[in-house]
Amino acid sequence: MSYTDKNTSLVFSPDDKYIDTGVNYNISSSYVSQIVQGTYLTLRSFPIGNRNCYTLKPAMQNRRYLIRATFFYGNYDGKYATNDKFLFDLHMGVNFWRTVNISDASQAVEYEAIIVALADFVSVCLVNKGSGTPFISSLEMRPLKSSLYPTVTASSFFDLSLRRDFGGSKITRYPDDPYDRIWYPRCNMWTLVKTKLNVTTDGFYEVPNVVLQTAILPINSTNSTVPEAADPTLNISLYWPIDPSVRNPSYYANLHFAELQQLPPNGLREFNIFANGYLFADKVRPSYLLNEPYSSQTPFQNPNGSDDSHVITLTSTKNATVPPLINAIEVFNLLPVKTAMTNLSDVDAIMNIKAAYQVKKNWSGDPCAPVVYTWENLGCNYDSSSPRIVSL
């Protein structure tokens, strides 16, 4: 049955229209009191088959979408004591997305991607690696405006690493963010500055106003309305750990800056941005009540030496009279679309055959790709740019 989220009023519908494999379960009663979202109460498990895929439709070809997958184990199978770690892969269509790593039955794991739909549907697959039965608690697809996230194309997609609202006091999502992006607050370790005035957003990312109305300054900075006494030598360093589960990362960041303080006539907030020690942008001067994003044009270089964290540093220039400020950040790993999906006309034809004969055995996801998951009793030709079905 459908479920309406009490925090966002968004409606979650049953998944049986989008997949015909798997088994439904409730989580263990001993974990019910720990959940924070109703979507964690149930899940779909896939004990049979190496690959099981959702077909999310309708979609508009060449449109960008936000895809979010959530996993809450909750000891649904009663095996937590003996099988206390799950590892299985998540694919976006026919391309690798993430390795899902579940080691705590009481903690939810969440992954988010921004993609371009390559057909009138989007396929999300769970792949068994022999280290625990794949399962999923919820799967979401939200359309994005065509101008958002221009780095994402048909040949690549974004995997979210982090999204932070600096200075915020609570999680921000729908309806404040019409695309239901989840902005997690971070305000400890820094000096908070905020405004009740409207902050104009940009056209490429449309950061919610409530996110832009807060920002952070270096610790020990003044947060007064007119910060004449602020120390410009103070800097901001933002760290996040290297994720060993991410293969060959290619990180891109969107940093959002809007001046929230009325500086004196001779005041200047000007700083340089460094990513892992390399110059990201120089002489940044935030505009009053106007968001100006700075986005990666090329991926980050990895940290030097044995560092186990990435770091973005905002460093005042010698001309600055006040220290740096930042309102929000998003960091993504850009993943390539390496494998081509089966020719769309062939997909339509075989899907019609599948529906007419109600075929379920090992017929899930793309018919021909990747090669290792080709549908049973199907012959495919890989000589062209997209695989073609040649026999059944």
Image: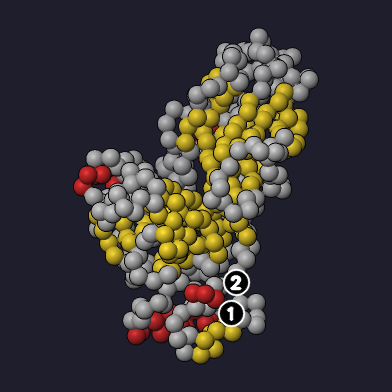
Could you tell whether 290 is left or right of 97 in the image? right
Q: CA distance from mark 2 to mark 1?
A: 7 Å
Quadrant in which residue 301 is drawn: top right
Which residue does the image show at 56% across and 26% down from the upper left? 215
Tag 2, which secondary structure? loop
Q: Quadrant of residue 52?
A: bottom left
Of 34 and 147, nearer the camera is: 34
Residue located farthest toward the bottom when viewing the structure as drawn: 391
Asked whether, in this view, residue 270 is left or right of residue 293, the answer is right
x and y, in percent, of residue 23 in the image = 29, 65
Proximity of marks 2 and 1: CB atoms separated by less than 8 Å = yes
**Which type of secondary structure does the marked residue at label 1 adopt?**
loop
Residue at the spot 33% in from the left edge and 61% down from the top edge: 45
Residue drawn at point x = 61 percent, y = 20 percent:
218
Q: Is the residue 175 above or below the residue 143 in the image? A: above
From the viewer's perspective, is residue 304 above or below residue 350? above
Q: Earlier in the sequence, mark 2 or mark 1?
A: 2
Q: Amino acid at mark 2?
A: Ala
The amino acid type found where label 1 is placed reads Pro
User: Residue 205: x and y, percent?
Assistant: 58, 44
Residue 254 screen position, x and y as percent: 62, 41
Query: What residue is rendered at 23% in x and 50% in y?
Result: 28
User: Within 10 angstroms of label 1, few (less than 14), some, or many (20 or more) residues?
Assistant: many
| Residue highlighted by disc 1 | 387
Identify the residue under disc 2. Answer: 340
Q: Residue furthest left?
A: 29
For the view shown, which residue lies furthest in the top direction? 229
Other residues around mark 2 within 10 Å, as few (<14) / some (14–19) / many (≥20): many
Would you say residue 344 is visible in this rendering?
no
